[in-house]
Structures are given as structure tokens and as C-alpha cells.
Amino acid sequence: MNPRDPQYHQASHDSQSAATMNAIHLTEVDGIPTLFAYAPGPLRAGLVFRVGTADETLARAGVTHLVEHLALYRHGLADYHYNGATKAAFTHFHVEGAEHEIVDYLHGVCASLADLPMERLETEKEILRTEESRREPGQLPLWRYGAQGYGLVSYPEWGVRGLRPEDVRHWTETWFTGGNAVLWIAGERFPAGLTLKLPPGARHPLPAVTSALPTTPAHFADGQGGVLLDAVVTDTAAARLYAGVLERELSRALRQEDGNSYTAATDYTSRRDGHAVVTAFADSLPAKQDAVLGGFVDVLAALQAGRIAPADLEAVRTRADTGLTAADAAVRRLPGAAEDLLAGRPPRGLDELRHELWSVTPGQLHAVALEAAGTALLQVPAGHSASWAGYAEAPVRSTYAVTGRRFEAVAKDGSALVVGDDGVSVTVRGRDGGDLAVTVPYRSCAAVLSWPDGGRRLIGTDGLAVAVEPGLYGVDAHTMAILDAAVPPHARVELPPRQSAPRAEAPEPAAASSAAPARRTGGQTAALVVLFLLGGLFAFIALATTVFGHDPDSSTGEWLGLSGFLWAVTGLIVWPAVRILRRTRRA
């Protein structure tokens, strides 16, 4: 029975089985696929588009978020609840309220997308920058995917500042179309009078999945917090249950047994392309970081070895089944089902989902654990490593440096900037005497940040970056002009003036004495005490020898030689103490 048919709603009101109430029905509104689920109470709806941050480029990052803000501006303050959300691959407009409020909201969103309020463009840009200042994006996507696709969620929305009205309109006309949208509705009846006036357009495929990791499992060190991990797995019921079992094991080992973590949790996010990302986190105090890292790796290793407690599997499975059979289960599944439909995956029935859930075996969880181990990316606290556990170091440098004009650092620290015909590199001398390099080829430059003072920062699609600072390397204006001409115009991001540009001066003899002294360590303080005691003793002996030590029976030369020797020893003892005093200060 069609959910838009009034008889459907009367029948559902009179006798609604649990299966029917948890069912998702597919219909359409003005040619747009529409998912409906019966739910008592206020009407809820969402309009979902297959576009998100991962469809952008780094130099234009934020354009989808800006469209979302502009499309909602005309709604202003309302008595009903509405909002929007821009995700990696999808943009949601959702609302909850009375029937006429839902209809008005959806009509308004479609009307705004057809004619965005460009008079609000600069104001909304400022709002986005304010919102971004409070955002703390995770670093795992950047390290896994690079500065493109799904990795862009780790970066600031640098593109917003330079977007022109025509740029925003073109993006809206390309992505926010009827062919690239799905509507979902949850309520006791289908809202009357609902229409969706969206321009026609093609359905867009999901963003390409890129990689910045030559090999996995891999790790990188960043921050002072706990341990983070994500792993890409096949999107199945077994994988969802694995995430739940992993959370129980981490909580048991790191909080209940060892007491080293307060929070140990996991998350499961479907990419809607047949794969999902399992994320795990455990926090720690600085003094407990080694223990938490070791315990975290031990839990992963135990699951990879197949040590999966049947009780854990049953507990997680029961909790998942309770969620599937809850009264509002279908409503909670609607946004994800809309994303699935946009990705070409038709909605699945409750019976199918429950059958898959209860068919999962410990062996299937073991297979997921092995799959996760092969794709794992681990973030460890700064100063730590996971190489001992078999995690390769994620690349922090390039495999080659470009050839071209070389500019030695003004600070004479051994680093150099190389500007070539095909890219730029920064090199430093390695421990083995060879050069270590970070290179950004022009052809794979995701963005070049440009400041009015002449500074540039080139970011490659692999996430590696090279700072080109004329004040640090003495780069001449002609070379900077050549570099600017070589970078693709669409990758350029103009930024406002900085408070101060990085500069380095050539070292001078007086630089050490004019620099602020470092804090004195406990070892240096102890050395001062010992040196001054010895120096004082030898100074006393030298003084006594000089004043009273002349023997009339000995020659004057011998007396002066002994006295001079003692004063020389005193000077050798005191001089290191003086150097420590000059270079340090009390804590």
C-alpha cells in the first residue's frame, strides 16, 4: 500500500504490527525518491543531497557548507526545530514540527537553493569562520586519504574566503538538484500539499577513495592525548558487532582492570560504498601514555588472534537487536537509508537486517579483526612510536627532491629550499649525511596558501607541505614570480595579512649573549656547587702559596711557577661554572 494513500494511514492507525511500524516504504515526490516510516508524534523530515566536503578541492573547501548556510538563512527564527549538516559525502536539511511547518520548510529550502540570498554571502562567510574557530577536526582522515577527497574533513575551510557569487551558484546548480536528492519523512501520515521544486540534474557517484599511506598498518605521532585508531573494513553486520566487542575489550582492559583510561570507546561509520570505518579511542594522562599504548595494542592483538569472548558477542548482538526492534528504529534508520539510496544501495528490510545480525559467528568477528589489522592507522602521543608492534611509520617526507635553484637557509641550520621547474622541495641533512626532503610537485598541488607579505605554503595531495618564506631562505622576487606562475591558478588561496612573517637572521657573535638564557636544570645546579667548591679550595691554596709560600732557601722561579700553576687550575675549574651561569637562569 502506498504511504501517500489516505487509506494507508487509516489502516496503520487501526492496527499496526511491529514489523509494519519498523518498515521503511519507498515512494516519490515530484520524481525525487522518498522514504517514509510510520511514527507517532511530531512529523520529521529530511532532504539529503549526494554532495559533501569530499567532493570539493582543498582550495575551494567550504563551498558546500556555505550553500547549506545560505539555503537556511530565510527561515530565520522559527518555533519548530530545523537545521542542516554538511558531512564528507552528504548534505542534510532536516526539520521537526507540525505538518504545515514541514511543508513550508521543505518548500523554502528548495526555493532558496534556486535563488540563494547572495546579499548574505560575506556575512555567512564570517559565520563559517567563527564556527570553524571552535572546530577541532581529527587528523586521521588527513593521514589516511591526504589533502583530497575524504581527507579534506581534517582541513580548514580555506576556500570560503575567496568564493564569488558565480562560484557558489555554479556549485549549487551542479550538485543540489532533484536527481541528486532523496527525501525522507517520519510521521503518522504523509504531509498534504508537499512539492519539491528542484532543478533536474544527474545523480553523482561517491567521491573517489584516495590513499596517502604506502603501506598499512601504519602509525604517526601527534598531540599529547591518548591513542586513536581507525581501520577500513567491509560494511557488514559482523563489522558493526566487531566495533562493539572492541569497545568492551578496551574498556575492560584499560579502565576496569588497569585504571589507565577514563574513556575507551569505538565508533562505526559506513562510507556507503560497501566499506566502513571503525574508530577506536582511549585517553590517558601523560604519565600513563606508554601503558595505554601497550594495552591498546594488546587488545587489538588478542582479537586478531581470535580470542573473542562469546559473552561479549552476545551482549553486543542483543543490544544491536534491541535497537533494530525499538519503536523508533525505522525513524532512526531513515537518514542512513537515504544516504544508502543516494549511493545506489536500496533500503534493507528489518527481517533481513536481523537475520544477518543473528547469523554472525565468532569466526566472522575474527575475520573482521584481521581485516582491520591490515588497514589500521594508529595515532600515538607525540614522542611515542608503534613500530615495535609492527605499525609502519606513516610518511613524513618525500622519496625525492626536485632539481632547480637552491636557496640555503639564512639561519645556516643545514636546510635549503629548492625551486624547480616541476615543483618545490625543502631539504635537510640526515644523520647518514644524505638529504631528507619534503616535495610538492606542481601537478599534484592541492592548494597554495598565499599571504600579501610574499609567503607561500604549497600543500600536496599527499598531505605533505612546503613553506616558501623569502625571509627564511632569501628567495628573490623573480624566483617567487616563477613559482606563482607554475602553480595551477585553481589551487591558489589568497589569505589576509599575517601579524608577522617568519624571518631568520644570520647568526652573529653577540647573538648568544643577547639571547634569553634557558632555565637551569637540576644537574647544572649540582655541577655549579661542585665546581665552585673545588674552585674555592684551589683559589685558597693558590692565594696562600702566593702570599705565604715563598721559601727563602728555594729560588723565586720555582715559587712563582707553583703559584701560577695553582691559579691556572683554579681558572680551569671555575670557567665551566661561569659558562653555565651565563647560559642559564634559575627556574
Image (tube, helix red, strand yellow):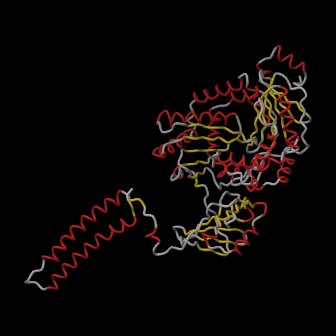
Q: Point out the image quarter for the N terminus.
A: top right
The correct choice, above or below, for 253 with respect to 492 in the image is above
Q: Which quadrant would residue 339 be assigned to in this image?
A: top right
- The image shows residue 503, relative to residue 157, as above or below, that is below
> In front: 508, or 79?
79
Q: Residue 287's x, y, as percent?
A: 45, 45
Depicted 216 relative to depicted 402: above or below: above
Quadrant of the image containing the C terminus: bottom left
- Residue 200 falls in which quadrant of the image? top right
In the image, is residue 35 above or below residue 509?
Answer: above
* Position in image of residue 94 (x %, y %): 78, 34
Query: How many numbered tags mark residues here?
Result: 0
**Nearer to me, 366 or 574:** 574
Tell me the residue at 71%/65% (across/down): 441
Left or right: 89 with respect to 501? Answer: right
Q: Nearer the viewer, residue 177 or 557?
A: 557
Residue 228 location, x and y as percent? 58, 44
Question: Residue 97's spot in the image, x, y percent?
Answer: 79, 27
Question: Residue 183 falls in which quadrant of the image?
Answer: top right
Residue situated furthest top in the rendering: 14
Q: Which residue is drawn at the image coordinates 31% and 59% (left, top)?
A: 526
